[in-house]
Image (cartoon, grey):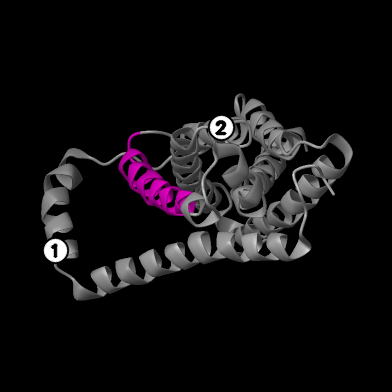
């Protein structure tokens, strides 16, 4: 019993860590859309121009995914997840407090890059650590993003009504991210198997043949359109809903 207790405990702790990681991503990802009116007011730009920060966030996500793909064979996904959480936590601290539109754009890019690292690393970790229950695990873990996206605007509303400040909603998301980083520090996370010398020699030829496949580029286009719609239109939908609610920075 004792021999099986430690691995099972580690698996449960890892699952809860991934669950909380996506909650952090959900909270911090949705808050800029919900608080865009306040961000535009803080940075002294029109709402339409402030919305361009969503484009930087989507671009950062793409860059983060590309970086994660390159590093996945050289670095344990645990450290990529910790890095992504760190980037999102930093962005969560910068976005609500800045009065510079340039810093807002940089923070949104950092947030997107962190989200890209989190997304790839969580899926990689789940595939390696929960291969026997992969479908169930991925469904449960991905549902936690929806929980975070639901909780984020509620935290913002509470923060505005009670404290007259949007910062505390972002702060909660950043704290969740830091908690997950702390949980991951001492956990054992499986890594991708290293390639032998023969596989490394054939890797360039494999890449060339893959990039010549029209189906691959069609998949890339579909994913790019999906990411653009999810991260772009999704934020604007939240902004439109927040406008209809007619809240002010004073929490009225």
Q: Which residue shows up at 66% across the image and 33% down it?
A: 174
Q: Nearer the viewer, residue 139 or 50?
A: 50
Q: Earlier in the sequence, mark 1 or mark 2?
A: 2
Judging by the rendered image, the residue that carries numbered circle 2 is 99
Q: Is residue 16 visible?
A: yes
Name the dominant secondary structure of the magenta segment: helix
Disc 1 target residue: 209
Q: Work out whether residue 26 can be spotted.
A: no
The number of numbered discs placed on residues in the rendered structure image is 2
Mark 1 Cα shell of 10 Å, populated few (<14), some (14-19), many (≥20): few
The one nearer the camera, 225 or 219, is: 225
Residue 175's place in the image compared with 131, above or below, is above
The circle drawn on residue 49 is none
Q: Percent from the top left, x then y, of residue 211?
A: 17, 63
Name the one closer to the observer, 181 or 99: 99
- Percent across and percent down for residue 91 are 55, 35
Identify the magenta region: 52-74
Q: For residue 41, which quarter of the picture?
A: top right
Q: In the rendering, at what x and y percent does residue 223 appear?
A: 39, 66
At 31% from the left and 69% from the top, the residue drawn is 221
The quadrant where residue 70 appears: top left
Q: Residue at x 11, y 55 (%)?
A: 205
Instruction: Using a 10 Å C-alpha cutoff, classify the residue at mark 2 as few (fewer than 14 neighbours), some (14 to 19) or many (20 or more).
Output: some
Is residue 68 found inside the magenta-colored segment of the image? Answer: yes
* Residue in view at x 41 percent, y 46 percent: 60
SS of the residue at dot 1? helix
Residue 228 lies in the magenta stretch: no
Choose between 123 and 51: the one closer to the eye.
51
Q: Is residue 56 left or right of residue 13?
A: left
Label 2 near label 1: C-beta < 8 Å?
A: no
Task: For mark 2, give the secondary structure.
Answer: loop
Q: Is residue 213 above or below residue 142?
A: below
């Amino acid at each position: 019993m004792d021999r099986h207790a430690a691995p099972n405990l580690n698996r449960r702790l890892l699952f809860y860590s991934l669950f909380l990681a996506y909650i952090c991503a959900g909270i911090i990802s949705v808050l800029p859309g919900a608080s865009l009116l306040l961000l535009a007011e803080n940075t002294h730009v029109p709402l339409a121009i402030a919305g361009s920060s969503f484009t930087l966030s989507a671009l950062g996500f793409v860059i983060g995914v590309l970086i994660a793909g390159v590093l996945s064979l050289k670095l344990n996904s645990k450290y990529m997840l910790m890095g992504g959480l760190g980037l999102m936590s930093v962005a969560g601290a910068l976005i609500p407090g800045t009065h510079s539109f340039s810093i807002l754009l940089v923070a949104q890019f950092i947030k997107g890059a962190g989200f890209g690292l989190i997304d790839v690393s969580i899926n990689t970790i789940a595939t390696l650590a929960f291969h026997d229950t992969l479908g169930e695990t991925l469904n449960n873990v991905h549902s936690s993003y929806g929980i975070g996206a639901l909780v984020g605007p509620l935290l913002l509303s509470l923060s505005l009504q009670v404290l007259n400040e949007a910062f505390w909603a972002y702060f909660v998301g950043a704290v969740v991210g830091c908690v997950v980083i702390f949980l991951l520090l001492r956990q054992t996370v499986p890594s991708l198997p290293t390639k032998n010398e023969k596989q490394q020699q054939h890797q360039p030829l494999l890449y060339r043949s893959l990039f010549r496949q029209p189906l691959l580029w069609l998949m890339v286009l579909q994913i790019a359109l999906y990411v653009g719609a999810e991260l772009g239109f999704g934020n604007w939908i939240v902004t439109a809903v927040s406008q209809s609610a007619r809240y002010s920075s004073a929490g009225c």
